[in-house]
Image: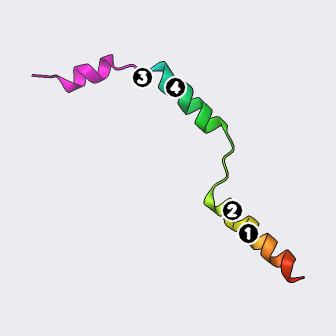
Amino acid sequence: MIDFEEELKKFQPSMEIDDAEDAIYSRDLTDMMDLLQEMQKESRNERR
């Protein structure tokens, strides 16, 4: 039978996953709130 506790002790993440994680977290991505705020600003400017 598999000893999950022992297997978890031996686990080491793949270097590719670490590189991908670093690339994702280091980027300043636009989220939905940023897009909505920008649309609101544009809408206000059009009304003036």
Q: Label 4 to label 3, Cα distance in Å?
A: 7 Å
Q: Amino acid at mark 4?
A: Asp
Residue sitting at x 90%, y 82%: 48
Helix, strand or loop for disc 4: helix
Q: Amino acid at mark 3?
A: Pro
**Mark 1 surroundings within 10 Å by alpha-carbon count, few (fewer than 14), some (14 through 19), many (20 or more):** few
Q: Amino acid at mark 1?
A: Met
Helix, strand or loop for disc 1: helix
Query: In front: mark 4 or mark 1?
Result: 1
Residue 15 among magenta residues = no
Q: Earlier in the sequence, mark 4 or mark 1?
A: 4
**What residue is pinned by disc 3?**
13
Q: Label 4 to label 1, Cα distance in Å?
A: 35 Å
- Are the residues flagged by discs 1 and 3 in contact, CB closer than 8 Å? no
**Relative to residue 13, is residue 35 drawn left or right?**
right
**Displayed quadrant of residue 4:** top left
**What residue is pinned by disc 1?**
39
Residue 25, placed above or below residue 29: above
